[in-house]
Image (spheres, grey):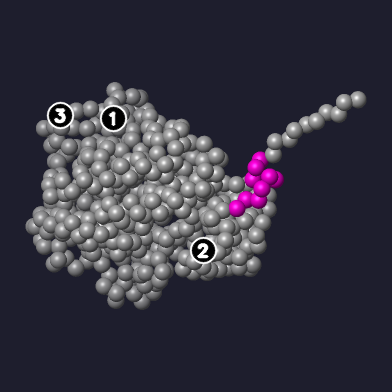
């Protein structure tokens, strides 16, 4: 009787060899529970990180070994992409916040595990945060790692600091009952995922002349008092008045006491350099310290730039030329009008041009940017092979009608090529960056085209939100109902 020989093909990383990486390894065990949105679950996390040798999955946890509470994070990315990102807190066995240093980052308990998916270089957020810190601003620090959940490989992740008030993060004063002046962190973002009563709609307007709604980030919406709400809302109204006066009276910005203009200029430079499709209008943070600490309004920290540096094709964001603030796209409609008022002011534009020239000598030099990209891409080069074996997207479409390279190095080369040409374009056009805000109330305007949310020209469609673009630069939003 002949014996039947069966060849079992077993995944390489499970039996044939031990998993090892030059990157730290993070392992999370959920105890059979599913990681959900909003409702956090308690589970175990361990981190392996050696300075003098490769990290092996079978090694003992030597960087962290304890409890965390974890949930899914992200809005559109959570719905669109199979590779999820997570928000978690390190906890004690009793469930209290546990401030610890993970992978040599400053001690805290709030963290993000960001899983780059649409960004095939895996670098864009890292690069943006690096450049912002080099410019002298706080931006989240991060460390690359490889993640396992319930012993299943999940790819390359970035352990990232969550934006919050802390001496090592947004370093503003902890708000006290006797001092309503700060500190505060607020943000402009989608309201669809915001808790009830988590935002207020201000007197400020966007390009479409709709109110700008700010969300309470610190103090949190469920902790901020009525007096604190009233204070920060009135303060932002005062900011609006200050910026309008800048526009109308050509006031020297050095005479304005409640705004830190360099932070606004740096944010504008980062957003325009990267042509961030969400710039100015989503994932946008502002903060104010106590008046005891020179409580001016600051822009930042920068956050969530994965859809930048030529990575998507809607709202003309992949084009080398053009200013995000000027291009006639549906995205411009939700950009706050105060940016256009600032650009009308001669001293603001002068400071912007000077600042760009200064940064081009060091932070924004090609050598500095490309050396950082090369260093990071080499650091994750072995691990990216495993990542894209799992998430096989290098030669596929992540965004509709858009595709860049076919290998990881193609993606990195494209990023550098795009940045090189974008910087050259800004060098040649920064002196003429001046915007005249159109009078959208005027009836003397001619309709040029109607577009959908991707910027594609369409005819009126029932039950769709469409954008009407006119010859004087106005963009108006309409819902075409039955």
Query: Which quadrant is the N terminus positioned in?
Result: top right
> Does dot 2 land on a helix, a strand or a loop?
loop
Instruction: Please check the rendered image and state whether residue 15 is part of the magenta-colored stretch, yes or no.
Output: yes
Residue 186 visible (yes or no): no
The residue singled out by tag 3 in the image is 446
| Mark carried by residue 317 | none
Neighbour tally class for label 3: few under 14, some 14-19, many 20 plus, Cα within 10 Å: few
Q: Earlier in the sequence, mark 3 or mark 1?
A: 3
Q: Judge depth for marks 3 and 1 and give the one in front.
A: 1
- The residue lying at 45 percent from left, 58 percent from top is 142
- The residue lying at 70 percent from left, 36 percent from top is 9
Q: Earlier in the sequence, mark 3 or mark 2?
A: 2
Q: Judge depth for marks 2 and 1 and give the one in front.
A: 2
Q: What span is colored magenta in the figure?
A: 11-20
> Does dot 1 land on a helix, a strand or a loop?
strand
The picture quadrant where one finds residue 469 is top left
């Amino acid at each position: 009787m002949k014996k039947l020989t069966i060849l079992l093909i077993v995944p390489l990383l499970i039996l044939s060899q031990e998993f090892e990486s030059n990157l730290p390894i993070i392992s999370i065990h959920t105890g059979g529970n599913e990681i959900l949105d909003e409702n956090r679950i308690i589970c175990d996390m361990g981190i392996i990180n050696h300075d003098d040798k490769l990290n092996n999955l079978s090694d003992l946890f030597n960087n962290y070994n304890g409890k965390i509470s974890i949930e899914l994070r992200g809005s559109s990315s959570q719905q669109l992409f199979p590779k999820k990102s997570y928000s978690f807190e390190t906890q004690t066995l009793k469930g209290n916040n546990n401030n610890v240093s993970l992978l040599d980052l400053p001690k805290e308990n709030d963290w993000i595990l960001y899983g780059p998916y649409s960004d095939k270089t895996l670098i864009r957020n890292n690069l943006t945060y690096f450049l912002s810190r080099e410019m002298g601003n706080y931006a989240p620090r991060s460390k690359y790692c490889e993640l396992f959940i319930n012993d299943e490989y999940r790819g390359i992740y970035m352990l990232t600091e969550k934006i919050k008030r802390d001496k090592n993060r947004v370093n503003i004063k902890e708000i006290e009952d006797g001092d309503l002046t700060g500190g505060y962190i607020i943000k402009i973002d989608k309201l669809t995922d915001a808790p009830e009563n988590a935002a207020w709609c201000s007197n400020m307007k966007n390009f479409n002349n709709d109110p700008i709604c700010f969300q309470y980030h610190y103090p949190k919406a469920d902790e901020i008092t009525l007096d604190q709400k009233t204070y920060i809302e009135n303060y932002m109204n005062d900011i609006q008045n200050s910026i309008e006066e800048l526009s109308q009276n050509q006031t020297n910005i050095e005479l304005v006491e409640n705004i830190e203009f360099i932070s606004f200029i740096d944010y504008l430079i980062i957003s325009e350099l990267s042509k961030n499709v969400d710039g100015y209008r989503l994932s946008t943070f502002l903060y104010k310290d106590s008046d005891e600490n020179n409580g001016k309004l600051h822009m930042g920290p920068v956050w969530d730039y994965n859809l930048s540096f030529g990575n998507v094709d809607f709202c003309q964001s992949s084009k080398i030329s053009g200013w995000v603030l000027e291009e006639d796209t549906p995205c411009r409609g939700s950009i706050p009008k105060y940016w256009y008022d600032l650009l009308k002011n001669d001293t603001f534009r002068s400071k912007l041009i000077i600042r760009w020239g200064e940064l081009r000598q060091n932070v924004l030099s090609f050598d500095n940017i490309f050396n950082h990209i090369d260093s990071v891409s080499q650091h994750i080069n072995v691990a990216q092979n495993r990542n894209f074996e799992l998430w096989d997207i290098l030669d596929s479409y992540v965004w509709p009608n858009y595709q860049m390279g076919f290998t990881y190095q193609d993606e990195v080369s494209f990023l550098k090529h795009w940045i090189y040409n974008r910087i050259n374009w800004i060098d040649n056009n920064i002196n003429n960056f001046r915007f005249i805000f159109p009078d959208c109330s005027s009836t003397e305007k001619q309709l040029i085209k109607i577009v959908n949310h991707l910027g594609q020209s369409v005819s009126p469609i029932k039950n769709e939100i469409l954008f009407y673009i006119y010859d004087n630069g106005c963009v108006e939003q309409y819902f075409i109902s039955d």
